[in-house]
Amino acid sequence: MSNTYEIIIGLEVHAQLLTKSKMFCACSTEFGLTPNSNICPVCTGQPGALPVLNSGAVDHAIRTALALNCKINETSVFARKNYFYPDLPKGYQISQHEEPLAVKGYIELYDKQGVPKKIGITRVHMEEDAGKNIHSDKCSFVDLNRSGVPLVEIVSEPDMRSPQEAVSYFKKLRAILDCIGVCACNMEEGNLRCDANVSLRKFGADKFGTKVEIKNLNSFRFLEKALSYEVERQTQMLDSGEKIEQETRLFDAVSGITKSMRKKEEANDYRYFPEPDLTPLVIKKDKIKSTEQNMPELPDAKKKRLMSSYGLNEYDADVLSSDVLLASYYEKLVSIVKEPKLCSNWVQTDIMRVLNEQKISIQAFKIKVENMAELLLLVNKGSINQNTAKSVFSEMLSGGRSAKDIVSEKGLLQIQDQSQIEAIVDEVIASNTAQVEQYKQGKTNIAGYLVGLVMKQSKGKANPVIVNEILKKKLS
Ligand SMILES: [Zn+2]
């Protein structure tokens, strides 16, 4: 990347609100049903059908705005955004335009040194989703199941300065939405997706360059790749004296490049006007106050608490606090095992590896927290060592049996008995005289080799701490 230009990025994130029914009708929001089975006159835009606002969606939108430190407007107004597309049977989308639900919020990001940076949130508004076009070789189909599903759109200020920072922002936003329970945040099902605006300007310039919008990025990886590609493309154009055109581009995940989709439309192309079938949305102060009082602990607060209560480092606390259920699994584990660091290591390495491999959340993780605690207690008491624990862990994953059962069936209990270990150490010393001699001449790192031999002879069951102690004593 060039050092001539400063990268300017802003994101518009669409999050599907987690409600049972759609935004303006009673149709279900369930994903993956037979096409056009969740539809009615309202969400298919039949003449004379009138929208009725889903108050559950409004509650979720208020929670979202509060969690993003926004100011909620007492009165906001639904507006028609007019455009034609086959998946939009009404010919307009009900959104909010001039008077959105909430404005002027922020999200705080931390860099590697833990220095905070605020990314501004311009606005949070409510809108309905459109249907979906499905294309085959010969013709196209329209599925209106998604038509009318409630969304919030979260628009950031152009405050991000690198693709990586944009990804951190999007991840943090997802953690917050997940934490307050307003969105399923399943990016593969498309209920959290983002459009990115990116432009370049010479360092020191005060005016922004012409921005390009990249549509519909539904994974963190795609967001980063699309932005990096776009930064490179714009840099080359500017370097060779070309002008950037304001346009909308699509990211092609297969080739990893962005392609022009259409020249960018202006807001007034949509002929916005207030929705005549809905009254303005009025949110009373009491409502805001009671919502505030019922907010859960947000990721930043959780992170701070994990650091202070359990002595976790910044990185570990960050990973845990970005997933509410994972954090709660961890805290339950600690409450039984009483060893915060040991539990954190296991959650962040072994458990998270399994979650990533199986692409599941902690909810679907096979080992219940009580059973996991039993395993870690065995480690902590010295009944089994870490290596044995790892193999018991895999066994628990596949068989569903308890740690204690596996350990006793397979005779894996760690050898703690001094005299038993001493006997093995003596044997090893006796049959490795050359190495022992080297050790005595100052090559002390040979001790590790001898410990390894003792462990091998004990079939991995000797307590390595005791092995070390005895061996050192005998050699000195
Ligand atoms: Zn409907």
Image: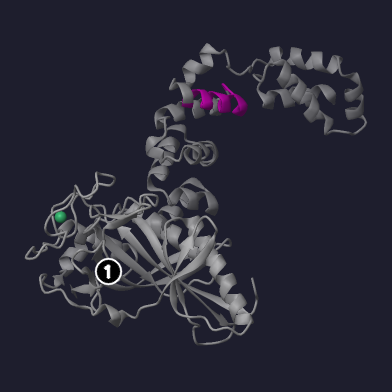
Q: Is residue 271 placed above or below 348 in the rendered structure?
A: below
Q: Position of residue 192 (x, y in %)?
A: 36, 56
Amino acid type, callout 1: His
Q: Is residue 115 visible?
A: no
Query: Which residue appears farthest toward the front when viewing the image?
Result: 138
Q: In which quadrant is the C terminus drawn?
A: top right
Q: Position of residue 391 (x, y in %)?
A: 57, 25
Q: Is residue 322 visible?
A: yes
Q: Is residue 55 placed above or below 200 in the rendered structure?
A: above
Point 11% across, 74% down: residue: 276
> Does the stretch in magenta take in 417?
no
Q: In which quadrant is the N terminus drawn?
A: bottom right
Q: Position of residue 238 (x, y in %)?
A: 59, 81
Point 38% across, 59% down: residue: 193
Q: Quadrant of ligand 1?
A: bottom left
Residue 44, picture quadrant = bottom left
Query: Which residue appears farthest toward the bottom when viewing the image?
Result: 206
Residue 458, picture quadrant = top right
Residue 81, picture quadrant = bottom left
Picture colour scheme? one colour
Q: Main secondary structure of the magenta part?
A: helix
Residue bearing mark 1: 125
Query: In the rendered structure, which segment of residues is drawn in magenta?
Result: 383-397
Which residue is more in the foreground, 176 or 34? 34
Number of numbered tags placed on the structure image: 1
- Check disc 1 and report its element: helix, strand or loop: strand
Which residue is more in the foreground, 474 or 49? 49
Q: Is residue 77 placed above or below 432 in the rendered structure?
A: below
